[in-house]
Amino acid sequence: MNVASLPAILFTLAGWALTVLSAAAMLSGPYDGRTCQTECVQMLFFSGMVAGVLGLILAIVGLRFVVGRRLSQVTLWLAGPLCAIFAAILLIGILA
């Protein structure tokens, strides 16, 4: 295992967890009854985005090493769709 592969998978999994938490917070009922309001959802969203992007960058860096290449590939497969989700959400938010 190389230096970049373990943090990459951890950041990616944290990004997925934060994405699921932000989606659950947004869909948890009427706005007035939520425990997680706008600032909380924004913090979850942007924290998940940063974790996903860091995971993607570290996975790309990890592909350069011979040791741990398989874990870096798996991380890349997990981080790629996560970053695509965030890019789509930001693009929709900018265009809408």
Image: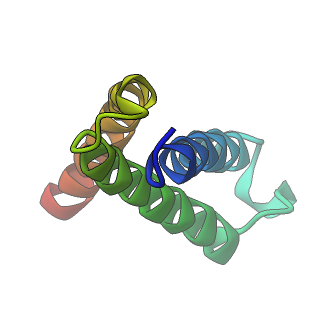
In this image, 85 relative to 64: left or right?
A: right
Q: Position of residue 23 (x, y in %)?
A: 61, 42
**Above or below for 23 versus 32:** above
19 or 61, nearer to the observer: 61
- Where is residue 53, by image quadrant? bottom left
- Residue in view at x 30 percent, y 55 percent: 57
- Residue in view at x 42 percent, y 29 percent: 78
- Where is residue 17, by image quadrant? top right
- Residue in view at x 34 percent, y 44 percent: 59
- Where is residue 62, by image quadrant? top left
Q: Position of residue 41 (x, y in %)?
A: 63, 63
Q: Residue furthest bottom?
A: 39
- Residue in view at x 46 percent, y 46 percent: 2
**Above or below for 70 versus 8:** above
Q: Position of residue 91 (x, y in %)?
A: 18, 53
Q: Count every numbered label the image shows and give the total.
A: 0
Check the image and tell me how it is coloured.
rainbow
In this image, 29 relative to 22: left or right?
A: right
68 or 60, nearer to the observer: 68
Q: Residue furthest front?
A: 66
Quarter of the figure with the C terminus? bottom left
Q: Position of residue 5 (x, y in %)?
A: 47, 44
In this image, 15 relative to 36: left or right?
A: left
21 or 81, nearer to the observer: 81
